[in-house]
Image (spheres, rainbow, N blue to C red):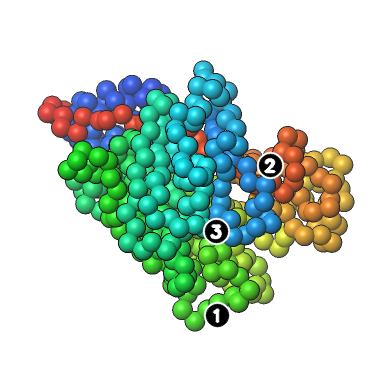
Amino acid sequence: MAVNELPDELLESVFLRLASPICLVRAASTCRRWCRVVADAGFLRLYRSRNALTIGNYIATDTVIFANWSRPSPSCRVSSLAFVPAAAAVTSSKRISLDFVPEPGNTSWVLADSHGGLVLLVPERYYWGNASSVSIAVCEPWTRRYRTVIPPLENKHVACLHASLLGGGTGSEKKKNNNHHVAGVSNFTVLLILYTFGSGAKTACIFSTFTGADEELRLRLTRSMDLGDLIRPKGVPRRQRHFDADAMHFAGSAGGSLYWGTIYGVVFALDESTGELSPLTLPKCCAGEQPRFYYRQWNLRAVGDDAGGARLVRVVQHSDLEVLTPLHAGGGREWTVEKTLRLPELITRGLPGLEDYSRLVERLSGVKILEVMGRSVVLTPPEGSGMWPFSVDLETMELERVYDWGDELVQKWEFPVEPPWPPALPLHATTDVH
C-alpha cells in the first residue's frame, strides 16, 4: 500500500505516537493532506491529552462557595492565586506570575479561565455589577504578553455569570481556517454568559477578535443564544426561593466541551468547535428519584479521559459517585452510567481506621466534590465526621487522603498553564506525497 493510500484514521494513529511536538510539526509540513490531519481540532485535542505539555497549574481557592450560591465559580482574585509547577517543568512561580498585567481601575482581576497558553482575566466588578464598558484581559504568562479589550454589549444593564476561552473557531471563522484555530493574545474566542437585570434573562454570547480600521484589537459578537428553556424547560415550575441568576452552575470543561448543571435537573453542554448548545440526556440517579435532580458544583463535575473525551461525575444517594460517559462513541446527547463507586465500601477498604464511615453517611449530610485533578476527584467527607478530604482515582478506584487541603468546605479550581501550542501550521504546504 502506498503512503497516500493510508486512511486518515491510520495516519492519526501514527501521528499520535510521535513523542516530540517537533516531529508532529515536521509531519504537518510534508504535504497538504498530512497538514489537514494534524491541524484537525479533534486530533490536536487528543494529542494534547496524550502528550501533556502542562508546565504547572494555577490553583484558585474559593472559601465561600458553599455559603454563597450566587457567587460565580470559579471565582478567585489573581492576588490570591497559587502556582504549582509540574514535576518535570523547569520553571518557577515567579516566572509565570501575572503581575505584568496592569490592575483594572477600582477593582481587581479575577482568573476566569485558562486554555492552552492563554489566561482570561475578568474584573471582579464584572460579576454582579454593571458590565458595560468594562475591559477583559487575555494574557500569555509564558511570553508575558497581554491585550485588553471591551466586549460590545447591546444591553448596558447586565452582569457576567461566567466567562471562558473557547478552543476552536466558530461559524465563518471555522470554515475560513479549515477547522484550524491558532489562539493567541490577538486571536481568541471568548464566551460570556450574561444576566439581564429586571427581566432575569440569561444569554450566552460568543465574541471573536478582529482588527479595526484604527488597527486596534476589538471583539465582535458572532453568536448569541438565550438559555431560558435550556435551564428551566417549559412546563417546569420555577423554584420560588432561589435567585434567578443562581439557576445554573459550571461543572467544568473536558473533551472540547463546557458543561453546566441546573437546579431544575438539566445538564447542558457547549461544543467549543461549533458553538452549539445542547441538553444532555442522563439516566435517573436512583429508583424513586424526584422528577428533577438538583445540580450544583459539589455534586456534578466534568472530567477528561485518557482518550481526549469527557466524562461526568455526580454524587448520588449522598455517598455514591457515578461516572457517566456518552452512550455512543464520539459523544452525543445521550449518556449512560459507566460505573458506580460505593464510597463507604471504598473508604473502609482503602483508608484504614474508618470502618464506621457507613454509619456516618446515614446520619450526616453527604460528600461534596471539591476539585477535579486529572482523572481523580477530590471529595469532602460528611460534615462532622472529622475526616480529611480524600481523592478517588476514577480508573484504579484507589483512595488517598489529602492532608494539605485545610478547611474541608474549601472548593478549588485548577487552571493548567501551557506553552503556546499548537504552533502555526503551514496550511499552504505545496508538496504532496506520491
Find residue 391 and name its label. 2
Q: Earlier in the sequence, mark 1 or mark 2?
A: 1
Q: What element carries label 1?
A: loop
- Left or right, residue 399 beside residue 184: right
Task: Say which residue appears at 46% left-offset and 45% top-offset.
Answer: 122
Question: Could you say where residue 161 lies in the image, as x and y percent from the top left?
Answer: 49, 57
* Observer able to see residue 1: no
Where on the picture, by quarter, is residue 76?
A: top right
Amino acid type assigned to the residue bearing label 1 in the image:
Pro
Which quadrant of the rendered structure holds the N terminus? top left
* Observer able to see residue 188: yes
Question: Could you say where residue 278 lies in the image, as x and y percent from the top left?
Answer: 41, 63
Label 1 neighbourhood size at 10 Å, few (<14), some (14-19), many (20+)?
few
Q: CB of mark 3 within 8 Å of CB of mark 2?
A: no
Q: Earlier in the sequence, mark 3 or mark 1?
A: 1
Say which residue label 3 marks.
Answer: 249
Amino acid type assigned to the residue bearing label 2 in the image:
Ser
Q: Is mark 3 on a helix, strand or loop?
A: strand
Say which residue label 1 marks.
Answer: 237
Find residue 325 and name its label. none
Q: As rendered, which of 227 and 323 lies closer to the eye?
A: 227
Amino acid type assigned to the residue bearing label 3 in the image:
His
